[in-house]
Amino acid sequence: MKRLLLIIVLLFPVFTYAQKPAPSTYDLLIGTYTKGTSKGILVYRFYVESGKLAYLSQIEGVSNPSYLCVAKNNKYVYSVNEDGKDGGVSSFSFNPVDGRLNFLNRQTSAGADPCYISVDDDQKNVFVANYSSGSLAVLPINSDGSLKAPSQVIQDEGKGPDASRQEGPHVHIAYFSPNEKYLLYTDLGTDKLNILRYRPSNALPLSPATPAFISTAPGSGPRHLVFSPNKKYLYLLHEMGSNINVYEFNGGKPVRLQTVKLLPDGFKGTNGAAAIHMTPDGRFLYATDRLDASGLIVYSVNQETGQLTFVQRASTFGKNPRDFAVDPTGRFLIAANQDSDNIVVYKIDQKTGALTPTNSGIHVGNPVCLKFTPAE
């Protein structure tokens, strides 16, 4: 009897942990361009049960925070400052109880027009893609969450066949593999996906992997990417070509499995694919296209092969959907229309992945980045 009671006592904490409910509220951080009515970064609370958004706060005086990332401990937020040749990176402390941001410091991005930022799970470094200068910068993080000056800058070289868009390198993303052994960055200007090894203890933490890059179709302009939750597959979105390449990641040696197009048959007009994300369970993938092709494109994902099947093309009810985010429960998708100053909330069909708009959208000046983080 005593032995049975001991087993029950030992198992009880495990049972309690397994039954811990998922959060019912999240904070939605919104990065913007400050050329219009926006003054900086906004924070809204998102309620999973209703799909509603409620304003919490904003921090003003932050110039063009067009892309954001949140530290794993939920205490710090980092943004680029997409200010042309004076590109910068800003750090903030974050209170997930009331959603308030407090400015810590700003450093140079060591390049022009930084457009993407990420942070490693151990919170040792942030990584910044400088679009116009075609470079990737590493900035170490201080113990208080603020940033040091760049410790490493990798300058890309080359050009592509489209003289109007690919006259030089244009780095567009800095994205970790699931195990953080690799950092991948796209170069729209040279049609390459670059692959780096990440060793955070080294003075120069990034070094070329083998292979150091893979090439995509000439003139396709690779932009953003996402890994499947099972860590096996990589989905690469091409801005200029408006298509998605599906790869088996294969331990840092990607093997292409499929290419799917975003544009409908017979489309004539301008296009510019922007963002790509998956549901947390990996069953559905979404991408946005902009300009005349503005819309949200939905695919189902074959769980055995990773390949995509078209499901739906949905309106974004606005101009130029720059970014979107799937909420951490996989029940809602929120899309940001950069040039119509509005954000639209969709319900996700749990069987098909199809999107249905709700009535809980909001107006925000030039929204260009959406990030969910747990509220407390």
Image (spheres, rainbow, N blue to C red):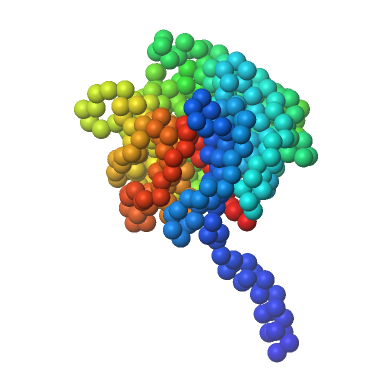
Residue 156 x %, y %: 57, 17
| Residue ID at (45%, 53%) | 52
Farthest residue to the bottom: give it: 1
Residue 91 x %, y %: 68, 34
Q: Quadrant of residue 185?
A: top right
Residue 107 x %, y %: 70, 25
254 over 156 or under it: above or below: below
Instruction: Determine if residue 255 is in view.
Output: no
Farthest residue to the left: give it: 266
Count the labels in the image.
0
| Residue ID at (41%, 29%) | 339
Q: Quadrant of residue 106?
A: top right
| Residue ID at (43%, 15%) | 165
Specify whether 360 is left or right of 35.
left
Specify whether 358 is left or right of 369.
left
Query: Quick one: 121 or 107, which is closer to the camera?
Result: 107
| Residue ID at (50%, 30%) | 37
> In the picture, which quadrant includes the N terminus?
bottom right
Instruction: Determine if residue 339 is in view.
Output: yes
Residue 9 x %, y %: 70, 78
Query: Quick one: 45 or 121, which is closer to the camera?
Result: 45
Farthest residue to the front: give it: 37
Specify whether 222 is left or right of 129.
left
> In the picture, which quadrant includes the C terminus?
bottom right
108 over 333 or under it: above or below: above
